[in-house]
Amino acid sequence: MKRKIRFAISVAALLTLAMTALNSLSVFAYSGYYVGGPSFNTTYYQLGSSGTFTVWVEFYGGAADIALLGVQLYFVKVDGTLYQSQFFGANYGDNPLLIPADTRVALTYNFQIPNEQSLISGRFYYVLYMTHREHGTIRYTTDTFGPDEALSEGYYCYLYNPLHPDYGALQAQVTSLQSQVNDLQSQVDKLQKDKTFLQSQVNNLQSQLSSLQANNTNLQTQLNNLNSQLNNLESQLNDVNAHNATLTKLLLLVAVIASIFIVATVYLVLRKPRAKVS
């Protein structure tokens, strides 16, 4: 019974993990589209002679179009200096910037750097705010980097798109796995109830066994007492038998003496001379 319970719990846990993994896949690996700067490499920005810092961010439409309502990019120095850029006013209002599916679009951002030397000597990071019609505003922050360093590849902001063609199949798998998990949970609950019932029976039998053992102890005590009394009676009987043997011997002796006395008396009587009749 314990093995069945442990097995059912293990299977339920594994299926729960599988379901969680599929949910993660449906959100990330099979997302409808993603946006972000693929690498933010040093080749992606340059410093103009007028102190204008130019950087571009690449957007990518996956399985669905991107309806981009607004973009704000902040170029932040590690010491706290903030350089802000707004692309086309960063607010498209009722005319969102559409990025078609399976299409890459690079948007250019310009920053006015007050001191060119500060860019060369400092370390920076990007903070990008993107406002979408479907998902609202998303904040994306990169690692820090210097003018001769490249950020790691793959800085993407994954977004969930229920219109992805694989979403229905994945959701069906998740639903199926959830049903299996529910069935296994029902089995686990039933086995747990059976275990509880059997444990109750075991406890009752244990209680009865303890009671029987206590009764057995009492009976054993009584039996020991009876055996002790029997031994006492046997001792007394032996004493009585010994006393009876002594009395029997005395009675035999008395009988012998009496017989001798009677015989002697008779003998004396018979030997007594009779008186003559004149």
Image (cartoon, rainbow, N blue to C red):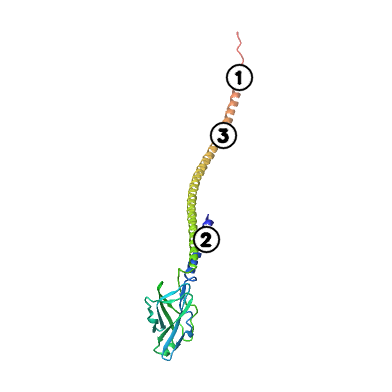
Report whether 264 appears left or right of 161: right
Q: Is residue 109 above or below residue 178?
A: below
Residue 245 is situated, as x and y percent measured from the top left of the image, at 58, 32
Given this view, does label 1 or label 2 mark the residue nearer the observer? 2
Say how many tags the image has: 3
Mark 3–mark 2 Cα distance, whole angstroms, equals 82 Å
Helix, strand or loop for disc 3:
helix
Residue 77 is situated, as x and y percent measured from the top left of the image, at 41, 84
Q: Nearer the viewer, residue 112 or 94?
A: 94
Given this view, does label 1 or label 3 mark the residue nearer the observer? 3
Mark 1–mark 3 Cα distance, whole angstroms, equals 37 Å
Residue 16 visible in image: no
Specify the farthest residue to the bottom: 49
**What's under tag 1, amino acid-wise?**
Val
Q: Nearer the viewer, residue 61 or 125?
A: 61
Q: How many other residues sit within 10 Å of disc 1, few (<14), some (14-19) or many (≥20)?
A: few
Which residue is tagged 1? 266
Question: Which residue occupies 53% across, 39% down?
Answer: 230
Which residue is tagged 2? 11
Which residue is tagged 3? 241
Residue 147 is situated, as x and y percent measured from the top left of the image, at 46, 86
**What's under tag 3, amino acid-wise?**
Asn
Q: Earlier in the sequence, mark 1 or mark 3?
A: 3
